[in-house]
Amino acid sequence: MLRTIERLARRLLAATDAVGNRWYGWRFNPLYQSGTIVVALYLALVVTGLWLILFYRLGAPWESVASLTANLWLGNWVRGLHRYASDAAVVATAVHAFRMFAQGRSWGARALAWVSGVLLFLLLLVCGWTGYVMVWDTFGEDLARESARMLDALPLLSEPTSRAFTGERPVPGAFFFIVLFAHIGIPLGMGVVFWLHVKRLARPALLPSRPLMWTVLGLLTGIAVVRPLLMAPKANPFVLPAEIPVDLFFAFWMPVTRDLGPGAALTTIAAAAGALLLVPLVAARRGAAAPAPSRVDEEICTGCLQCSLDCPYEAIEMIERTTSRSELVARVDPSLCVSCGICAGSCAPMGVGPPGRTGRDQVARVQAFLAGSDRRSGHVVAICCVHGAAVSSPALEAEGAAVYRVDCAGNLHTSVIEILLRGGAGGVLVLACPPRDCWNREGAHWLEERVYHDREAELQARVDRARVRIAHASAGERQHAVTVLRRFAADIATLGVPAADRTIEVDAVCEPEEPAVRR
Amino acid sequence: MRAGGTGGAQVTRLDRALGLAAAVAATAGIAWASSIRVTPHASQDAVLRLAWTARPERVEDCRPQSEEALEKLPPHMRQAVICEGTTASYRLEVRREGAVIVDQVVRGGGLRHDRPLYVFRDILLPAGEAAVSVRFVRIDSKTTATSGGGARAASSDRDSSGHADDSQGTNAMDPERRRRETEERIRQRGESVPASLSLERRFHFVAHEVILVTYDAGRRGLLAIEEPSR
């Protein structure tokens, strides 16, 4: 059932990603950068919030916000940006979570990121709740009443919180103080949870590409200027407002809970939050379906550090070796390893990687591939990531290419490319996922570094670079993949047929290199 | 574009324009969904809101501590009268033009019902004039049992001095402490909601407006509050 949902979600993702890539290119596709967009919006919220807080008065909440809103230049658009940025943050968070779920990146070593992400989402909703209640207009009052009704279902407080909003007495100033305190304190707490969220990532990308970031903030500012915020009427416990301006992003749950009893409403919300938190348990692959973590062959490992530098999840550390082969040896922490196989691509002597996907396994596999291939010499081999361009295999094969599938482009050992060329392939086209959407974070990036920028485990200098090309295509970009293949095949045709030579030497040493700065 | 790869698909001007239009539409959509007008109270009804909190009366057995028992206790733990029991429950009944529209039993809060009771009901009523009566009457008002010679009853039914034995002198207890204990018991009793509360009035209900009926602890009676601007 869950696998079916995941599959459907991946199809939807592939279709929307393809549209995003066509409109914006993969570098600026906001769907690929939804997580970092949330961070950019968070920063915008902090800046605008600091400005707004200067004008907020606990003794007259509605009046102070109304006065600020009436000021079109110094108040209204800032408040509008604050509000729309928070709404956009909810949307971007939902998109990010959907992507992680669809791509199966929610369990195992990534469970901490998922759970902390759900907590961040809940904190965002609570923070938005406090922001609207602070205004104390009809919507804020409605939110407060509905929440108090549910809270009172818990036998926690000696006096029901709903009592504060019945009109028996004015809403106490302490209430607004607590709400303001929470509105400031929760974002600080979110910072700590965010640290947990990215804790297991090496070189986490925190912000989107600058053009995308400024475009998002510019659009939100523009809409805040073009569509000035209007104040809803002040909260009045003696009047039931006929109409309430509701923010769908922060009050989407109210139509569901309003018709339920307080206990049922609270249970529904708790069940929804619990279901989100349990995704890592439910989505986890077990037994044979669970990919095995990488292993180190200590007889081969030269202690060069490269695998630990390239690992996107900081799952490999270098420890002192007890034998005399080298001072250090790599050790994989299975609890952190997601079995991406990027270490296999980074290890020149082929001493590390998930079982069945180490460099040596890849060499054996590609030799079998060549032996079983009945294509004429000079044809193009398209190496396709199973998460992306491999979906387009039939179309690529129809164009005459031989398709060689890999789990991740970053897993690919450059020797495989060399063997393919020596085995008679006219050219090797690697169709990797767009770098911002690599399921293993840095696979496409490291591959490009190894092929074109001499990063350790590099493609040997003797390999003719004119016969190698790396392109990016997502699962939904079949036509783009075919177009790239046609262009490459046309370029290869001008180079003539290469001489087959199936002998190859594998590097037994490697020279560690500092990681390049991520784009 | 860095050296080497061919990157992704080329973005044409038309695609770029479409992308920009989509981004603007998405932003406008966010602004629209950020302030959707909903009508949670679509009907033209008015609301009679019953909202109050009060301390329920105690229904308990009280017995004086013997001189010997008091002497066994440290001075700061001595209590001349020990009361054990529970709190009273109440019947809330609301009638409109003589017809019962609410009839419920109200108990004190907390798992043991020993916390203050809380009444909160929003009753939708059609706009217009109507005679409304609200009654809040203690249910456990009778002496229900005897135990160890002491009467079990709602404590306010007892002697206003607190307890018959309070006046008996003991050597084990400081008179000042005994006086404070008696005063505290009387104060707690005074804070309890009276055994019977009622309010009968004709109200003019206006659509979408709330008339609040609450308990005034100072006057020890029910009180109706209407929208201050009316």
Image (cartoon, coloured by chain):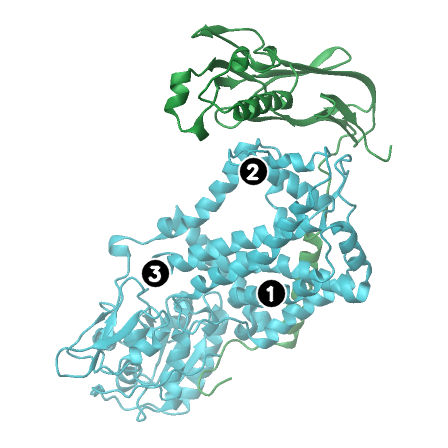
Task: Tell me the quarter of the picture where residue B195 sits.
Answer: top right
Q: Is disc 1 placed on a helix, strand or loop?
A: helix
Residue farthest to the front, as pictured: B171
Do dots 3 and 1 share one subunit? yes
Disc 1: which chain? A
Q: B49 or A332, which lies in front?
A: B49
Work out whether mark 3 precedes mark 1 in sequence or the reverse, and give the earlier one.
1
Chain A image colour: cyan
Please name the amino acid that badge 3 sits on: Ala
Q: Is residue B87 above or below residue A238?
A: above
Q: Is residue A410 above or below residue A235?
A: below
Disc 3: which chain? A
Instruction: Residue A378: give x, y in percent of width and height.
Output: 33, 85
Nearest-to-viewer mark from 2 and 3:
2
The residue pinned by badge 3 equals A109
**For residue B211, side relative to residue A368 (left or right):** right
Q: Is residue B21 visible?
A: no
Q: B191 or B181, which lies in front?
A: B181
